[in-house]
């Protein structure tokens, strides 16, 4: 691979953080080294080995393909064909990895070429062997055909031989007849001897044939034996039956001495031919198949000659010998060929097996050898060039903390874990509830620890120690006493504040104080009473604690909603609280409590008759449209921008005018809606730029508009007895808060109930719950299928255990602390 | 007397350290170090072990605030820190390239804890980048079959971070004020 060529890499299973790092690198320093492609085109892969399922994926990839893989991991990985990149990633490391990848790719290419060449060679050899096998098979088939032909020829020869035997058996009878008829002829004896001699030869030939046939064919053996017996029988018994016919035939046969001589000559000639044939057959055994074929041809010729001779000399006894010899030779030849062929077959099969057996390991050897050699080299190079896995620089601040990150980074993870575990246990005192953690223990741990990680300074440690000591001595009574003192102190502060405000003399503040006295002092009195009760009766301490806590939480909730004017000590804060009260009135109203569904009709409203209904309908109908829509009602202008999920309103949502518009029913005929043209859109954009406070998110706008519309009332046909839940929490950090909103949301989300139950559970006014419900309903956040809600372990109506009470008390105090 | 801990987690730069700093009654103990990796392109320093802050409740009680390191290589700290925690506050940075992936990763990493405890999600830098929207996060949470409130927060604003903690407390015990 040329050095200037970019490595095509694909990122798989990369965590967002590392992906961001890698993409940044690829855009900058790694731009000339790598190019990002999809997995199919990739020459190399980058995989975060610490991701879930990455290990299995890597194993699969390595099994299927030969790609270099850059493994990102906090632990060193020694996997062939991979390059370990320690976390955190660094540009240097990635640059070095590029070199390694290039080397691996070069090795892979080379080994691929080598493998290909070897495969091609092996394939060629296999093809040659295959061709050879096919050739052998063809030859074998040809031999089989030839053998069949010879067998058929043999059979025909047997038939002819039998015929000859029969004829020869009949022949002496005919001669005998001739002797009887021509007793005067002296030469008859010689002729008779000659014939007997011929008969003997024929018998030998028949025996030879029988012997031969035993070798070649058992069936023929039977036939031959039968023929022999027939010959013998015929010579004695059948002569009379066939006499006339033989006699007629013998009339055409030369029976003089010359004829007998010629027969003997012919017999001798055939014996010579037989010897020649045997020589040829001997040669065949040592020659190739093709040579054998040629020999067969010769044999065929010989057979033809023999056949011709047999045919021509039907009564020529000498021919029998030559035929027998040929047959014997043919059988020997066939046997020899069969044996040779079987041997060759076995040899070929064994050779093939050896060939295949040789091929497979050779491929494996090539692959595994290549991988092992290639990546061992690369890995060694990588190991040499890998930078520090963490590489963090210690700063002065770190020195104060005695935390040597460079050192810790070089530790194994287990060491770090153990160290931090130990540190956490000793210094951070995770188990603060454990009474075993005494001052001595902490001090001992702190001093005995050799760890350099000490995240708490001495002052902190002392403070921790003090708290642990206090905890050891702590009891519930002391805890509640201090709490009650705090509550009493805060109540006094409120009273003092009221006195101060009265002294200031502002009418507005006076009114506020009156309100506070009416609305809140009851609760304060309750708190005071609770405090007194708590001090009188130690058995009711827990209940008193909860009651006082409730009052505190209420106060603090109100304070947080009013923007942190909780315990105002001056007129400005008090004015803020008054404004908050006024605003709550606008948002949640002051409707009376209802007791059942029937009474709920007194506090219902029709959403469609209000601005809220019009806006919700408009948002719904224009949901998928890109245009901006303007809704105008009297002086109010609302622009709905779906592209930005924003609503622009020319009137502040906190204004009295907007509150009145929302609360009152509107005249639908006076509402004008149209989509903005280009110039109007530009005007709208300009207005938003100038008055960003007039632009609201859909959620914020609908939330506030719903609250202002309902003012603690319920939409028409709302069931107050049906349990409801919350699909999702409103974005309460960016919405106009109402008292107890967070608590109401939590109850709806975790402990669904109906609209009558929840205010009772939380011990709050119904209007806050109704207001929240209406706002959440407008935002389509109400879940009517309460089975879908993920309930918490907490359940209203059940008596809490001491542990829960204690925990709840702690949570309450924490809430109070958070809201101050 | 009770001492509990709350865990702040999330990706690098999401504002965990800032959130703890905002809420803590003591100067926070931080293990911030100069980033040597590409994290430094997002911020010059990063938490390497943990952040620690504390909210004092009266003289005796306190809530410990722990911030996990955002980098995955310190993920072994996560289990250590979450042991015995009241709940988890996940801060996500809306300006990151793939906040959805961040959400999936961290909810998966703390899956065991989330199943037992409560999760509150705060999304930072939504004023800088208005997409994805809060509704997108809700949809993703729904896809993951997780039930958790999602709030837009500014880690520098005490009221915002306080709301996260309050939501956690109310989620743990909706009857807290009853």
Image (tube, grey):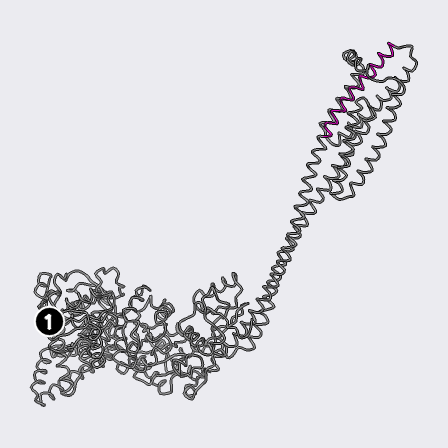
Mark 1 — residue? A663
**Closest to the observer: A119 or B74?**
A119
Residue A273's place in the image compared with A755, above or below, is above
**Closest to the observer: A267 or A717?**
A267
Residue A349: image x %, image y %? 67, 47
Q: Secondary structure at mark 1?
A: helix
Can residue B133 be found in the magenta stretch?
no
Regarding residue A441, the answer to whether it shows in the image is no
Residue A466: image x %, image y %? 33, 84
Which stretch appears magenta?
Answer: A153-181
Q: Label 1 lies in what chain?
A: A
Q: Residue sitting at 77 percent across and 39 percent down?
A: A295
Q: Which quadrant holds the C terminus of chain B?
A: bottom left
Residue A132: image x %, image y %? 67, 48
Q: Magenta-highlighted stretch: main secondary structure?
A: helix
| Left or right, B43 with reference to A104 | left
| Left or right, A102 with reference to A134 | left
Q: Residues within 10 Å of mark 1 (few under 14, many from 20)?
A: many
Q: Residue sitting at 62 percent across and 58 percent down?
A: A120
Q: Which quadrant holds the N terminus of chain B?
A: bottom left
Question: Residue A532 lies in what quarter of the image?
Answer: bottom left
């Amino acid at each position: 691979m040329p050095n200037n060529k970019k490595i095509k890499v694909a990122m798989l299973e990369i965590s967002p953080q590392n992906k961001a790092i890698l993409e940044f690198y690829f855009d900058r320093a790694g731009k000339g080294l790598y190019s990002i492609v999809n997995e199919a085109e990739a020459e190399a892969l980058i995989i975060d080995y610490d991701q879930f399922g990455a290990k299995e994926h890597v194993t699969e990839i390595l099994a299927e393909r030969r790609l270099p893989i850059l493994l990102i991991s906090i632990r060193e990985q020694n996997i062939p064909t991979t390059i370990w990149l320690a976390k955190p990633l660094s540009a240097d490391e990635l640059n070095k990895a590029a070199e390694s990848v290039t080397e691996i790719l070069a090795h892979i290419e080379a080994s691929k070429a080598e493998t290909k060449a070897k495969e091609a060679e092996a394939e060629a050899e296999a093809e040659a062997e295959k061709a050879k096998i096919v050739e052998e098979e063809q030859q074998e088939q040809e031999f089989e055909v030839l053998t069949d032909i010879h067998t058929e020829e043999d059979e025909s020869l047997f038939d002819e031989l039998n015929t000859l035997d029969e004829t020869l058996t009949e022949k002496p009878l005919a001669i005998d007849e001739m002797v009887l008829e021509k007793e005067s002829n002296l030469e008859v004896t010689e002729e008779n001897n000659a014939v007997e001699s011929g008969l003997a030869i024929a018998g030998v030939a028949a025996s030879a044939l029988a012997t031969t046939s035993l070798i070649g064919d058992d069936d023929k053996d039977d036939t031959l034996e039968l023929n022999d017996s027939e010959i013998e029988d015929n010579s004695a018994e059948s002569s009379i039956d066939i006499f006339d016919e033989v006699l007629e035939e013998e009339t055409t046969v030369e029976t003089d001495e010359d004829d007998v001589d010629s027969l003997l000559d012919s017999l001798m000639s055939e014996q010579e031919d037989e010897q020649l044939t045997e020589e040829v057959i001997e040669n065949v055994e040592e020659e190739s198949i093709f040579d054998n074929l040629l020999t067969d041809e010769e044999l065929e010729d010989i057979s033809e000659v023999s056949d011709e001779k047999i045919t021509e000399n039907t009564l020529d006894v000498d021919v029998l010998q030559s035929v027998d010899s040929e047959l014997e030779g043919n059988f020997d030849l066939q046997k020899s060929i069969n044996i040779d062929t079987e041997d060759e077959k076995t040899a070929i099969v064994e050779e093939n097996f050896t060939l295949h057996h040789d091929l497979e390991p050779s491929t494996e050897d090539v692959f595994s050898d290549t991988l092992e050699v290639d990546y061992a080299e690369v890995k060694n190079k990588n190991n040499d060039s890998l930078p520090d896995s963490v590489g963090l620089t210690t700063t002065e601040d770190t020195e104060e903390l005695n935390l040597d990150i460079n050192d810790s980074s070089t530790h194994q993870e287990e060491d770090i874990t153990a160290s931090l575990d130990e540190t956490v246990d000793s210094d951070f005192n995770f188990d603060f509830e454990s009474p075993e953690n005494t001052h001595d223990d902490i001090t001992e741990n702190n001093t005995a620890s050799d760890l350099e990680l000490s995240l708490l300074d001495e002052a902190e440690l002392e403070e921790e120690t003090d708290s642990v000591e206090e905890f050891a001595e702590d009891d519930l009574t002391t805890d509640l006493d201090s709490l009650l003192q705090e509550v009493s102190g805060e109540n006094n502060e409120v009273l003092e504040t009221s006195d101060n405000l009265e002294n200031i003399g502002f009418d507005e503040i006076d009114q506020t104080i009156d309100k506070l006295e009416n609305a809140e002092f009851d609760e304060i009195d309750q708190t005071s009473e609770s405090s007194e009760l708590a001090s009188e009766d130690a058995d009711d301490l827990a209940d008193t604690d909860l009651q006082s806590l409730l009052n505190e939480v209420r106060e603090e909730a109100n304070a947080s909603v009013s923007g942190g004017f909780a315990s105002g000590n001056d007129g400005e804060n008090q004015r803020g609280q008054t404004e908050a009260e006024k605003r709550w009135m606008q948002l949640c109203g002051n409707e009376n409590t209802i007791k059942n569904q029937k009474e709920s009709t007194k506090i219902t409203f029709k959403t469609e008759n209000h601005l809220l209904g019009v806006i919700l309908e408009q948002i719904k109908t224009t949901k998928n449209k890109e245009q901006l829509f303007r809704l105008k009602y009297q002086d109010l202008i609302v622009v709905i921008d779906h592209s930005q999920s924003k609503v622009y309103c020319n009137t502040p949502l906190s204004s009295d005018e907007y509150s009145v518009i929302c609360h009152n029913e509107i005249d639908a005929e006076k509402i004008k809606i149209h989509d903005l043209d280009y110039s109007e859109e530009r005007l709208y954009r300009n207005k938003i730029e100038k008055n960003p406070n007039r632009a609201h998110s859909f959620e914020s706008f609908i939330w506030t508009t719903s609250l202002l519309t309902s003012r603690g009332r319920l939409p028409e046909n709302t069931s107050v007895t049906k349990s409801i839940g919350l699909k999702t929490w409103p974005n309460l950090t960016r919405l106009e808060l109402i008292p107890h909103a967070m608590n109401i949301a939590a109850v709806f989300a975790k402990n669904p109930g109906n609209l009558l139950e929840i205010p009772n559970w939380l011990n709050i006014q119904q209007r806050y719950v109704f207001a929240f419900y209406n706002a959440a309903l407008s935002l389509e956040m109400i879940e009517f299928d309460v089975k879908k809600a993920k309930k918490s372990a907490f359940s209203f109506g059940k008596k809490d255990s001491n542990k829960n009470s204690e925990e709840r008390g702690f949570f309450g105090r924490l809430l109070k602390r958070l809201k101050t | 007397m009770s001492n509990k801990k709350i865990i702040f987690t999330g990706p690098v730069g999401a504002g965990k350290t800032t959130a703890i700093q905002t809420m803590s009654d003591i100067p926070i103990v931080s293990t911030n170090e100069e980033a040597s990796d590409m994290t430094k392109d997002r911020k010059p320093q990063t938490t390497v072990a943990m952040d620690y802050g504390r909210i004092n409740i009266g003289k005796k009680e306190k809530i410990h605030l722990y911030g996990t390191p955002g980098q995955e290589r310190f993920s072994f700290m996560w289990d250590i820190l979450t042991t015995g925690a009241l709940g988890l506050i996940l801060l996500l940075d809306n300006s990151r390239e793939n906040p959805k992936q961040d959400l999936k990763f961290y909810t998966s990493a703390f899956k065991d804890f989330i199943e037992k405890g409560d999760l509150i999600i705060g999304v930072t830098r939504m004023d800088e980048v208005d997409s994805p929207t809060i509704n997108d996060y809700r949809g993703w949470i729904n896809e993951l079959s997780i039930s958790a409130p999602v709030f837009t927060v500014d880690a520098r604003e005490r009221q915002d971070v306080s709301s996260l903690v309050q939501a956690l407390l109310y989620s743990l015990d909706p009857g807290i004020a009853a």
